[in-house]
């Protein structure tokens, strides 16, 4: 069975290559975009009131021609146009957020606030609300309780809607470092799009896309193919990454610079950690301090390295994402002092009271692969029932032949190291890779009452069964 599946994927790979556009080596030299912040219609600094219009739009991903996308527009700015990613929502912690979604799409939609601990009624899933019909609107209200880098996207037919361009970043500022510690604070939303040579979005979804999550043939940083970023030589910047791709794993590297991890999904780490590469699975976020070398007139390359996520996924690498050109030396920053919040390890229940979730797949029919949690496909899956206030230990076992990034709504968890101790140095997580043929253990306090979704963030997998409900009961 495995051999046959491989053969299928191999032939489907031919298709992907066949529609691959111009070689990646010729940089477009488009300047790295700066995401426009959404218009705040509320003068009160403790509140943000904004409008997001979801609508069809036309974008030039390739010089060859425009693509018809779906995108968010800042409805509070009469001059704004829809773009991918949508407007950046950036607030201080504790801000009361009120965002009206206006649906100008031909289909129903919602907005899910990925990673934010919102009330269950504001979570934007079909279990939380009736999806907003074309021409309709819905106002989301929640408090920005936690600092961190988050993102927002539809939770209806997500594999299609996010792929078409409906996503944006939401930053809640922390006070661990000050603005002076960084020459710049940038948000990079990563994605890949499957384009035809004429620049249009490919309309084909082949067996490979269903099996692996639609992998694009053009990589995007903030909606631009291989942009060029100008930065000061010898300076330190803060970079916030979001992986908004349907299926692609990004393994990031910036050779020649020093990287310190500052925050993961759920906000600041207790201490900064030096690293060479960053693996970012779909849905995941990471914040870094980037210390650039002191030599002006040099260029560095942000790239994504080959990642083996199973099933012989065609993922050549390294592939270029962004050129970083160093300008005149900026003000060289004193060493970074990063004293993050203390993260107390959650009490870990014994192995006997561990809840096990098993991820599996059925690729018998390559044109219709199915994905399961505990052997069942959503909506047949059995809901996970947890009384509010309970701390549970979960063992997520992946019996499938490929990795799956698991996302839990409404809470953050801590992962356990192999000896069963919470890895608090890694911070709070809401999305984590579960490698094939392996288990990952996590621990969480379930205190956000309501119905939540738990699913693989390879969107095709979620839509094809790898999803279940979590009921946190009063
Ligand atoms: Cu990013 Cu259930 O979502
Ligand atoms: Cu998956």
Image (spheres, rainbow, N blue to C red):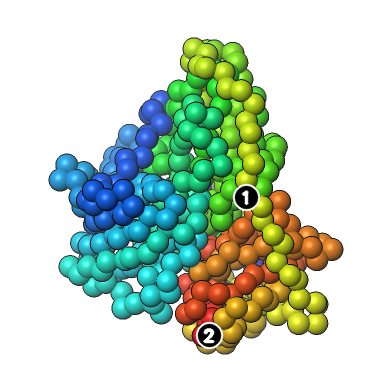
Q: Which residue is mark 1?
A: 341
Is residue 444 in view? yes
Name the side, left or right, on which 312 lies relative to 169: right
Residue 198, picture quadrant: top left
Return the residue nearer the eye: 109 or 349. Answer: 349
Note whether 289 is above or below 74 in the view shown: above
Name the side, left or right, on which 203 lies relative to 432: left
Return the residue nearer the eye: 129 or 32. Answer: 129
In this view, which residue lies farthest toward the left? 78
Counting from the top left corner in percent of width and height, residue 286 is at 57, 47
Residue 344, picture quadrant: bottom right
Q: Secondary structure at mark 1?
A: loop
Local packing at callout 1 (Cα closer than 10 Å; few below 14, some 14-19, many 20+) is some
Q: Residue at x 65, y 60 (%)?
A: 433
Q: Residue at x 51, y 51 (%)?
A: 148
Is residue 403 in view? no
Counting from the top left corner in percent of width and height, residue 17 is at 51, 47
Name the side, left or right, on which 200 lies relative to 262: left
Q: Residue at x 49, y 12 (%)?
A: 328
Disc ID at residue 473: 2
Name the side, left or right, on which 240 lies relative to 136: right
Q: Point out the tag, 1 or 2, that comes first from the N-terminus.
A: 1
Q: Residue at x 79, y 63 (%)?
A: 421
Distance from label 1 to label 2 (Cα)?
29 Å
Indicate which label's residue lies in the foreground, 1 or 2.
Answer: 1
Note whether 256 is above or below 206 in the view shown: above
Q: Is mark 2 within 8 Å of ligand 1?
A: no
Note whether 216 is above or below 108 in the view shown: above
Q: Secondary structure at mark 2?
A: strand
């Amino acid at each position: 069975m495995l051999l046959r599946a491989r053969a299928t994927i191999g032939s489907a790979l031919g298709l992907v290559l066949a529609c691959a556009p111009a070689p990646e080596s010729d940089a477009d030299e488009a300047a790295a975009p700066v995401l426009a912040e959404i218009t705040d219609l509320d003068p009160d600094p403790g509140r943000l009131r904004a409008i997001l219009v979801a609508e069809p739009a036309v974008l030039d991903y390739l010089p060859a021609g425009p693509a018809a996308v779906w995108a968010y527009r800042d409805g509070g700015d009469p001059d704004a146009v829809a773009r991918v990613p949508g407007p950046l929502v950036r607030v201080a912690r504790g801000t009361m957020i009120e965002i009206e979604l206006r649906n100008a799409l031909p289909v129903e939609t919602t907005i899910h606030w990925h990673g934010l601990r919102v009330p269950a009624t504001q979570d934007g899933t079909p279990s939380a609300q009736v999806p907003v019909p074309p021409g309709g609107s819905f106002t989301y209200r929640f408090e920005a309780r936690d600092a961190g880098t988050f993102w927002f996207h539809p939770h209806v037919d997500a594999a299609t809607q996010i792929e078409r361009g409906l996503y944006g970043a939401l930053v809640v500022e922390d006070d661990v470092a000050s603005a002076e510690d960084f020459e710049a604070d940038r948000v990079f939303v990563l994605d890949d799009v499957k384009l035809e040579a004429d620049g249009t979005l490919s309309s084909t979804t082949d067996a490979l896309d269903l099996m692996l999550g639609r992998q694009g043939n053009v990589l995007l940083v903030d909606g631009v193919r291989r942009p060029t970023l100008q930065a000061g030589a010898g300076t330190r910047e803060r970079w916030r990454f979001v992986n908004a791709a349907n299926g692609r794993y990004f393994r990031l590297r910036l050779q020649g610079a020093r990287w310190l991890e500052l925050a993961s999904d759920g906000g600041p780490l207790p201490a900064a950690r030096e690293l060479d590469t960053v693996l970012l699975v779909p849905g995941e976020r990471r914040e870094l301090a980037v210390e650039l070398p002191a030599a002006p007139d040099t260029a560095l390359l942000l790239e994504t390295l080959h990642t083996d996520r199973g099933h012989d996924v065609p993922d050549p690498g390294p592939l270029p994402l962004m050129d970083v050109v160093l300008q005149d030396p900026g003000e060289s920053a004193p060493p970074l002092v990063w004293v993050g919040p203390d993260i107390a390890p959650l009490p870990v229940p014994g192995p006997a009271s561990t809840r096990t979730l098993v991820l599996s797949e059925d690729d018998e029919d390559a044109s219709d692969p199915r994905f399961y949690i505990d052997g069942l496909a959503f909506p047949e899956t059995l809901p996970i029932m947890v009384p509010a206030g309970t701390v549970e230990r979960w063992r997520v076992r992946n019996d499938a032949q490929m990795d799956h990034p698991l996302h839990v709504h409404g809470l953050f968890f801590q992962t356990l190291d192999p000896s069963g101790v919470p890895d608090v140095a890694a911070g709070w997580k809401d999305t984590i890779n579960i490698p094939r043929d392996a288990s990952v253990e996590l621990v969480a306090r379930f205190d956000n009452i309501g119905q939540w979704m738990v699913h693989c963030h390879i969107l095709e997998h979620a839509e094809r069964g790898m999803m279940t409900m979590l009921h946190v009961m009063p």
